[in-house]
Image: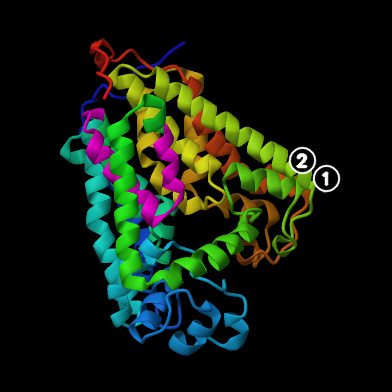
Amino acid sequence: MTEANPSVPRRWSEGRILLWFVLFALVIVIFGPPYLHAFRPPDGTVGDFHQEWLSARNFAEGGPVYADQRELARRFLGTPPERAAIMIPWNAHPPVAAMLALPFGRFPYAQAHLFWNLVNLPLLALAVVVIVRELRIPFAPPSVLPLGVVLVGWYALYSQIQHGQLNIVIMALVAAAFLLEQRSRSVGTGLAIGAAAAIKLFPAFLFLYFVSTRNIRAIVAGGAAFLALNVVALAVLGPTEFDTYLREVVPSVANYQSSRQNVSLAGFWLRIFDPHPNERVVALIASPLAANVLSYGTRLLVVLLCASAARCAQSKAERERAFALAVLGMLLVSPVAWPHYFLIAAVPLAWLWMNLVSRMARLAFWIAFAVVWLPNYYVPKLALGGPDAVREFLMGTSTVRPGQNLAIMSLPNYALAGLFLLAAFGRTSPAAEDSVPPRAEP
C-alpha cells in the first residue's frame, strides 16, 4: 500500500491557510520570548559560544587560544569558582573554529553572542532556499507558514541560537555541497566539505562519498580547502595552539562519548557497557570490550552501507539518496553527536519527506522526526517527573538505570538510526531524474 507522493502540490484553500496561520501564531507566542532571550542572553548567562568568546578575548589580550576555560571564565565573565569548577577545561573546537570567532572577542559576551547569531541567520535562510530548490519541494507564498512552524518549533534550532553553536555554518556548507554535487561541480563540492571539516572534524566523513565515487577532483579540492584554512589558522594562532589542541583538547573529548545526550553509535554502546563515572549511568553489563566491539562494528557497517550506496549511484535520484545517507551516517559514526546536530541533517530529513512512499515507512519517518524535533529532555521529563527532572538530566546529576537508559535516554539514538535505515532501504517513488544518463567518471 502506498500513498501519494508529498511532492504533488495541493491547493492552498482558505481553511488550510487559516489553520497554518493559527499554528504559526501559536508557535510565535510560545517560542517568541525564549528566542528573544536566546539571541542575546541576559547578563550572567552564557551558552556554548562562551568557548569561542573566552578564547578570542584571551587571544586579544595576548594569551593563548587554548587556555584553561575555568580560569578564563573567572577572569572575563566573573563566574564564581564553584560554577567555574564544573565547566569544561578546554575550548573543544578546532583551531579554525577558534580563529573564526576572533573578531567577536572585542565585544562583551552578550553582544558577541547576539552578533554571532545575526551573522548565522542569513546562512540559515540560504541553506533552506537551497534545500527547497534542489529537492524540488513545492513552495507557494503560504508555504512560509508551515515552514515557520517547523523551524521555529524545532528544538535543535532553538538550541543552536541559545548556545551559539557552529551547526548553522556546517548546515549551510553541507547544503552547498549537496547543491554542487547534484550539478556535478566537483571542485565546489570538495571545497564546501573541506571547509566544514576544518571547522568541525566530523564532516570529514563525507569524503567517503567522494572516495566511493572516485571523484578525484572533489577529494583534491576538499583536501586543499582543509589544508588552506588550517595553514591560515596556523599563521594567525601559532604552532603552540595546534600542539595543545592535539595533545590536550582532543583526548579530553573522549570523556564525553558516553554522555546521556550523545546520539551517535559510540554514545549508545558506551552508555550500555562502559559509561564514564561522571555520567552517572549504570551499565547494563560492565564490559569495555563489548562496548568497543559493538561501537566499532556498527560504525563499520554504516561506513560500508554509505560507500556501497555512493559507489552504485548513477542517476541524479540515486546520488541524492547516497548523499543524504552519508550525512546521516556522518552523525552516527561521529564519536560525539549532540541533539543540536540534528540541524545539520536538514538535507536528509527533507529528502526523506519528499521521497518515501510506503505508508509504513512514512509513519516511521514521522515518529523519528518527532523525536529529533522535540527537546531531547522532553520524554525524560514526562517519564521521570519531578520539578528538577530537566536540570538533573541535562547536568547529569541524576542516576540513570539500565532500563531508563534503553527505554528513555536512547530514543534520539533510535530515531537517528531509524532515519539512516529509511534512507538506505526505504522505498521511494520513481523519479524523472532516474532517466538521466550516468555521469562521466572525473
Q: Residue 112: x percent and y percent?
A: 31, 75
Decide: is 205 above or below 279. Answer: above
Q: Is residue 131 visible?
A: no
Q: Residue 390: x percent and y percent?
A: 61, 62
Q: Which mark is residue 290?
A: 2
Q: Residue 336: x percent and y percent?
A: 55, 51
Q: Amino acid at mark 2?
A: Ala
Q: Secondary structure at mark 2?
A: helix
Q: Are marks 1 and 2 in contact (CB under 8 Å)?
A: yes
Q: Does residue 160 appear left or right of residue 316 in this picture?
A: right
- The residue located at (70%, 43%) in the rendering is 292
Residue stretch in magenta: 182-208
Residue tagged 1: 285
- The residue located at (41%, 69%) in the rendering is 239
Decide: is 121 above or below 148. Answer: below
Q: Residue 240: x percent and y percent?
A: 45, 72
- State the residue lying farthest toward the front: 239
Q: Amino acid at mark 1?
A: Ile
Q: Nearer the viewer, residue 134 or 369?
A: 134
State the separation of the CA atoms marked 1 and 2: 9 Å
Q: Secondary structure at mark 1?
A: loop
